Amino acid sequence: MSDHTTHHEEHHKETFISKYVFSMDHKMIAKQYLITGIIMAVIGMVLSILFRIQLGWPDESFPFLEKLLGKWAQGGRIDPAFYMSMVTIHGTIMVFFVLTAGLSGTFSNLLIPLQIGARDMASPFINMLSYWFFFLSSVIMTWSLLIESGPASGGWTIYPPLSAIPKAMPGSGLGMTLWLISMAIFVASALMGGINYISTVLNMRTKGMSMTKMPLTIWAFLLTAILGVLSFPVLFAGVILLIFDRGFGTSFYLSDIFIGGEALPNHGGSPVLFQHLFWFLGHPEVYIIIMPALGISSEIIATNARKPIFGYRAMIISLIGIAFLSFIVWGHHMFITGMNPFLGSVFMFTTLIIAVPSAVKTFNYLATLWRGNIQFTPAMLFAIGLVSLFITGGLTGIFLGNASLDINLHDTYFVVAHFHIVMGSAAMFGMFAGVYHWYPRLFGKMMDERLGYFHFWLTFIAVYCVFFPMHFMGLDGVPRRYYSFTSFDFMKEWLAVNRFISIAAILGSLAQFIFLYNFFRSIFKGKKAPQNPWNSNTLEWTAPVEHMHGNWPGEIPWVYRWPYDYSKPGHDEDFIPQNVPLSETMSSNLPGDYGTHHGSKANH
Amino acid sequence: MNISIAQQLKSSTKAILLFVLLTISSTISFAQATMPAATDVASQELGITFWFYVLLLIAAVFAFAVINKTLKVLELTQELNGKKIKNTYNKVNGVFFIFFLVLFLGYVYYEFTTHGRMVLPESASEHGAITDNLFNITAIITGIVFIITHILLFYFSFKYKGKETRKAFFYSHNDKLELYWTIIPAIVLAVMVLSGWKAWTNITAPAPKEALTLDVTGKQFAWIVRYPGNDNALGSKAFKLVNDVNETGVDFNDKNAKDDLLVNEIYLPVNRPVKFNFNARDVIHSAYMPHFRAQMNCVPGMPTTFWFKPTITTEQMRLKTNDPKFDYLLLCAKVCGSAHYNMQIKIVVVNDTEYATWLTTKKPFYTEEMAKQIQEAAASVAKAKEEKLALNTHE
């Protein structure tokens, strides 16, 4: 192995900067995405703990908060305006910076070239640029936490006029400007990444790797990238128009407003227009978040159940179905904005249809586990946890997708519970599963399994303790984004429940330090990873453990079979990697393997 | 190898001792912290409680380390006996899943029976009874799916946990089965869409003619409610007319406006449809009346409406909920600024005679004096604007 590296260094003269900072190697970029994502996740988590303290103990003062937050927590109690800021930035960081960039940025970069058998991305330079745009937007978003007037505070959906008029609330001043700049840069980063992923998957597959021999991870990343490329520009347009309204006196979103003692001159705009533009990205966005997690869990469940994924083609079709439908359901976020009720009926119809492919995926996961030989690696535990959360959160979506029920549930804690389970926690579990599973590929070391078990069980229990009671708060008509529940008599009975939720959230977040310790310690002190630690079929495990430019020292392996030949009858081992020719496995070949069934012709 | 295990044990005993010591010392320091001190209580308390939490955290980390070390010892002994630790962990996690299943179902039952009882009382509006019914049907269907899929998921995880001797069953697809579990959810969802669609169309249909029409305007952070008065017609309004006296910008040249009423509490007659005309004058608000299962956004520059028929008076609801202080509320559900969490107005549902009596106690808010005030306010606004322009200090 050292031969390769020395050989390499002679040719390229890699400096520290070109190797670790401005690297164009997809594996290094994946690591950069992951570590930036983890840092952002910790910031998002700390914010959530701070506002959980407020919600759990609304009447008590905590002097340490004043030490930590200064003027935002005078007398040890969090300021209402800063509470709103924390909720806003928590949402923004988790949705965009952790679960979009951190999740699909990491694993698309790592796995697309390695699993399809390519030397690198289609354009390594744009790939590097994509990371550094993401880094810049992360820095701006984090920096906005430190400015005097406070960060953006209108909720992560930044509906105007609240976000458009600096007078409307403290965070709508410089904080919102920084938010908008950061998001504009983020969109540029997401587009550069997305274009790269799509062109790499379509053009650079190794010989024999037809579309229907690709692992489901790649299908998920490809469709995610397509969603991103088609929907992020719409957010970009929305953001630019908002910048115009804020800075240049246009009236795209503003009309008939009297605020701060004077009537604004704006006329003819519509705040609902922004909501349409925002949710045209916003809804595909939640699938941009969950689809990579579903792809990752498909791969991990098949590998660790030692069984082919059940219904490979149905899984692909349902992914395509979800991707297509996700573009025509955005209106279900807007049932009660005053949108035409007929339009509401249409969106209700499309929204409930999207539950069908989701149900198919769930049943296929269950069928994959059935009669398997399940190896409980930490990755597998998190993948099973994902399925559980996907079911729980998906089912509450059926309530919210129904316009007539949404009237009473809209903007309540029922919604908070729903999306934190189905896209927040489930996607986070997918990310954890991915990190545990591909850690050997990322760092060439193994993570500590025991710590992984602790991490999983504590997190899994904490997630249900935190989010499950919130459904009932929502059914009691408790709206979200409330600074405290002390102003209404009927909400006071939920104070004790909120304290329980806060304690569970704090304990759950402490459990994340087990992961952080395990992650960073294993980089340096972990056991050295074998080449194929999970006996997996996919191509990334045929590459040498030590990273090198170009991924494979010699020729890129050819692919002869689909990636799910696990426990195939007639074969001694319980796995047959994709690069093993059919001629070497005569005892286990099935009639379908020679072409017709899995969709492609094995012509070599 | 034996020696190394002994060493491990020794170090874990040390850790336990340290853990006990820390627990005791932190409890003592906490006890001291809670005792009233003679001088400078606050700062002392701050210092000690802080260290209490630090010690607690250290103790927790140590406790965790002890468990971790013990497991490592277990791992080593297993390896000594020639067993593979992988299989042990498969077994342990598989069994955990069955424990978790039982615990989880128990927890869900507890949630439904405890927190499930704290939800809103029965709907006080006509359409709400229908959507509540729809909600219950959806809850039963999804509940069944939820329980069955979770039992299967965790039971499979337990039953098929990895063993050296087991080989997984190569089963790649079953088109018939997949067709079934595509079509069945599709049919169930189609039924739900149809019933939801029916309810939604009825709710959003135009309000009946006899409906009482109210004008509700949201502002940061209060609701302004205007009744039409005796003529049952609301006067028109324009945001340019808004000032400190005329908060919603009612146009008093409109003769319908002359007898309009402004109220601090919304009184509604029972069993008569009421139509709300919603508007906001600064940012988006959402008028949420949870007890009536009613909600509609209030958007600046875009009028919205919602109508419903209240069916239960406040008095009756107080009896039903056994809460003499119960009140219906209209609250804000769309984030609108720092005091979003406290933007409410009381709704009182009464019978017709009580409503008529209440109405007679209200005087139209338009008076000669007010007209004068409005003119003054408008003049001062205009003057301020002129000065601003003259000084060129436009914001």
Image (cartoon, coloured by chain):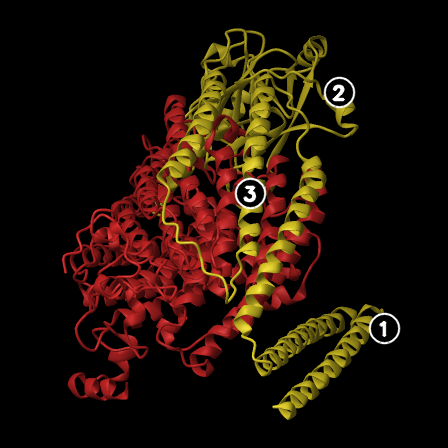
Quarter containing the N terminus of chain B:
bottom right
- Asked if badges 1 and 2 are on one and the same chain, I answer yes
Residue ID for mark 1 = B38
- Residue A384 makes an appearance in the image: yes
Residue ID for mark 2 = B315
Amino acid identity at mark 2:
Glu
Bin the neighbour count of mark 3 within 10 Å (Cα to Cα): few under 14, some 14-19, many 20 and up.
some
Tell me the SS state at disc 1.
loop
Amino acid identity at mark 3:
Arg
Q: Nearer the viewer, residue B391 or B99?
A: B99
- Asked if badges 3 and 1 are on one and the same chain, I answer no
Q: Name the colour assigned to chain B in the rendering.
A: yellow
Judged left or right of residue A228, residue B349 is right
Residue B92: name its quadrant.
bottom right
Q: Nearer the viewer, residue B48 or B17?
A: B17
Q: Name the colour assigned to chain A in the rendering.
A: red
Tell me the SS state at disc 3.
loop
- Residue A53 makes an appearance in the image: no
- Seen in the picture, residue A380 relative to B197 is either above or below; the reply is below
